[in-house]
Image (spheres, grey):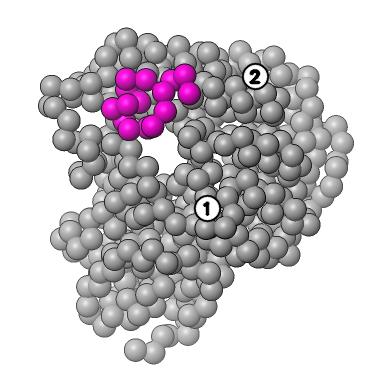
Amino acid sequence: MTLDPRATVYVETYGCQMNVSDSELILGKLAAEGYRPVDVPEEADVILLNTCAIRDHAEQRVIGRLGELKRSMRAGSVMGVAGCMAQRLGPELLTKARHVSLVVGPDGYRALPELLARARGGERAVQTSFDLEEHYEDFAPRRFDKVKAWIPVQRGCDYRCTYCIVPFTRGAERSRAMADVVREARQVVEEGIGEITLLGQTVNSYNDGTHDFAELLRAVGAVPGVRRLRFTSPHPNDFSDAVIEAMGDVGAVCEHVHLPMQSGSTAMLKRMLRRYSREEYLECVARLRARIPGIGLTTDVIVGFPGETDDEFEETLSAVREIGFDDAFTFKFSPRDGTPATRMPPEWTIPDEVAAERLGRLIDVVRSGARSRNLGLLGQRREVLVEKPARRGDLLQARSRDYKTVLIPGDASMVGSYLTVELTGTTGSTFTGTVVQERRSLPVAV
């Protein structure tokens, strides 16, 4: 079937940064095939939802959104679901939403043009097989952000935590060749982007068979024009001395780590199959802070996991207080079909009202601690990268190297600039600031 040269595609993304990166790959592939990306579904011949499956709430949002988007479909248009939810449910999605005619998992994007042609011909196409060699090296991503870039270095996961669906939706862990990652970093710099985030499910376990994550940090950090280098999400077990030393040595590596904890109780961590104890997590934090003074730390925490006792929850609160995270993503446990957590004894199930009460207490502890520490930072100066206009039209959103969000006055011409600002106020989570000195300006189109 010949593609109409005016064919358009709309992609809506749910979930983590890896999904954002995958959407960039999808759009790049379809643009190379002649599709023109559009910003609203009403203008699209192809509507794709790139989905997350890590929690039930995320999947229910997608199901609801599919119903809403049905009203945006035109005669002859195609609705498709991509990503982790597509991988998990496969053909079942075709029965949940009759107007969906395309289901494709994270390893199937190379086949998208063919799948779309079949769908436009009236078929209902499904591609959810794993391909452990696929890294989409020949794809040219169509980046959403003109200030910072996501570069995937690893796909899949081998850890198999008992609550996690990722190994079932993204397959086994495999790493890109370091030379390919460095090549993409050079391309990013040529596009005028100076901040790079390396992506992986457990990114610091990266190993391409010859090079490990410490070597990758040094290689990407040495690319001329890479001003800031971040990575997410690491696993506490994989912070070797070599990785931490590279973080301290490489000037581009930012002073921030998102370090998922999940629980502060060793017994709970064992049930989660996290493979470290409370004490080992605290020791990892201590090693990071010793080598990189002032490092910003954020985390993930789950409450209400099967069997969580009051004492185990209190251990989580005490760990949060002891560590002093700058922020945390906090969640109630969400059972995912097929994961070991769903096979735990029914009597271990935590009532929803108990989990909700614990979540509220955890959020209060995180926020109060962050607010107290942030008040102590007022008057300090930070280099920030201006990322985008803030929700308030007269302010810009900027980010420091240690991942503080700072709102400053200015206009859109300043997006992409590196500035020195003084922190003048805080809401508890974000800062306001005034520009003290402009270091370097790299204006970008917005």
Magenta includes 115?
no
Farthest residue, direction left: 346
* Whole-percent x, y for residue 434 in the image: 79, 30
**Hey, what amino acid is under mark 2?**
Asn
Q: Is residue 329 above or below residue 202?
A: above
Q: Which secondary structure class fits the magenta region best?
A: helix
- The residues bearing labels 1 and 2 have C-alpha atoms spaced at a distance of 37 Å
Q: In this view, does 73 lie above or below 320?
A: below
Horizontal side of 235 relative to 48 (left or right) equals: right
At 68% from the left and 54% from the top, the residue drawn is 220
At 73% from the left and 65% from the top, the residue drawn is 190
Dot 1 or dot 2, earlier in sequence? 1
Farthest residue, direction bottom: 2
* Whole-percent x, y for residue 373 in the image: 63, 16
**Label 2 Cα neighbours within 10 Å, binned few <14 / some 14-19 / many ≥20:** many
As helix, strand or loop, the secondary structure at mark 1 comes to loop
Magenta includes 271?
yes
* Whole-percent x, y for residue 83 in the image: 36, 57
As helix, strand or loop, the secondary structure at mark 2 comes to helix
Q: Is residue 364 above or below residue 255?
A: above
Query: Where, quadrant-wise, is the N terminus in this rendering?
Result: bottom left
Horizontal side of 28 relative to 82 (left or right) equals: right
> Which segment did they paint magenta?
266-280
**Hey, what amino acid is under mark 1?**
Asn
How many tags in the picture?
2
Please indicate, yes or no, whether residue 312 appears anywhere in the rendered image. Answer: yes
Q: Name the residue under label 2.
A: 374
